[in-house]
Image (cartoon, rainbow, N blue to C red):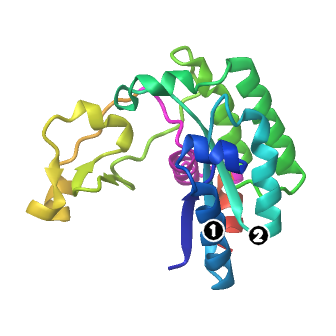
Amino acid sequence: VDMINFSFDGPQEINDFQRMEGGYDKVINAIRIARKNNIEVITQTVITKYNLQHLGHILEKAEELDFLAGFQPAMNRPLSGPLLKDTIPNKEEYKKTIIWLMEQKKNKAHVANSMEGLRHLYYVYDWPKYKKHIKCFAPDLHVYVDTNGDVYPCFHVQEQIKNPLNCTEIGFKNAYNQLKKLSCYGCWSWSTVEFNLLFSLSPSAIFNTIKLTK
């Protein structure tokens, strides 16, 4: 194992509220174990109205424990359910937070997102008026495999596929070869954004990926 990704949403009370009771202690302990064994760690933070003002805690822990922190917004999508709507922050406060993360990135903080990726996430809240689309490489260069083995071009389009092909039943190659590129409402998952920017040959994303993978 070269790298592990953990969900980490802020100080103990915030993280445990958004994830699960006792989750904060578990994730901090897991990060310590991984780093002790020289396994790289990148955390994933979903920016909500509850942790908007607490992202500094994550970057402090990132510096203390030597890991990188990735950030992405909470966004409405058909499979998210009604509860997610209550977590989405005010648009202007969200954009101020992205600008703050850009400043932290410039100051060499442990932010995993590239500058270009952060700029993309800044504009994400202007859907459907958002025009700065990035090229999508799903399913040509990346796909999504659900926990039960169902294969999708990307997790953004799950709701569009009523009868997904399952790689445990017909094999991954057969499932992959039958995938079709589908339209979606835009990309907000930071890791997918970075992947698409990388293969779009964005200098910022390329340089950032080199730093991430050392």
Which image quarter: residue 99?
top right
Q: Is residue 76 visible?
A: no
**Nearer-the-camera pick, 59 or 120:** 59
Does the magenta portion include 195? yes
**Nearer-the-camera pick, 159 or 114:** 159
Question: Left or right: where does residue 125 sit relative to residue 137?
Answer: right
Instruction: Name the secondary structure under disc 2.
Output: helix
Q: Main secondary structure of the magenta part?
A: helix
Q: Position of residue 117 (x, y in %)?
A: 65, 43
Instruction: Name the secondary structure under disc 1.
Output: strand
* Cβ atoms under marks 2 and 1 closer than 8 Å: yes
Residue ID for mark 1:
41
Residue at the extreme bottom = 37
Q: Check the picture and name the quadrant holding the C terminus.
A: bottom right
Q: Identify the residue at horizontal 15%, vertical 55% (top origin).
A: 166
Q: Identify the residue at horizontal 52%, vertical 42% (top origin).
A: 189
> Range of the magenta residues?
185-204
- Tag in front: 2 or 1: 2
Query: Mark 1 belongs to which amino acid?
Result: Val
Residue at the extreme left = 170
Of label 2 and label 1, which has the lower sequence position? 1
Q: Where is residue 69 in the image (x, y as percent from the top left)?
A: 69, 55
Question: Left or right: where does residue 108 sit relative to residue 2?
Answer: right
Residue at the extreme front = 21
Residue ID for mark 2:
65
Q: Position of residue 151 (x, y in %)?
A: 24, 52
Q: Identify the residue at horizontal 69%, vertical 40% (top origin).
A: 118
Q: Position of residue 86 (x, y in %)?
A: 54, 22
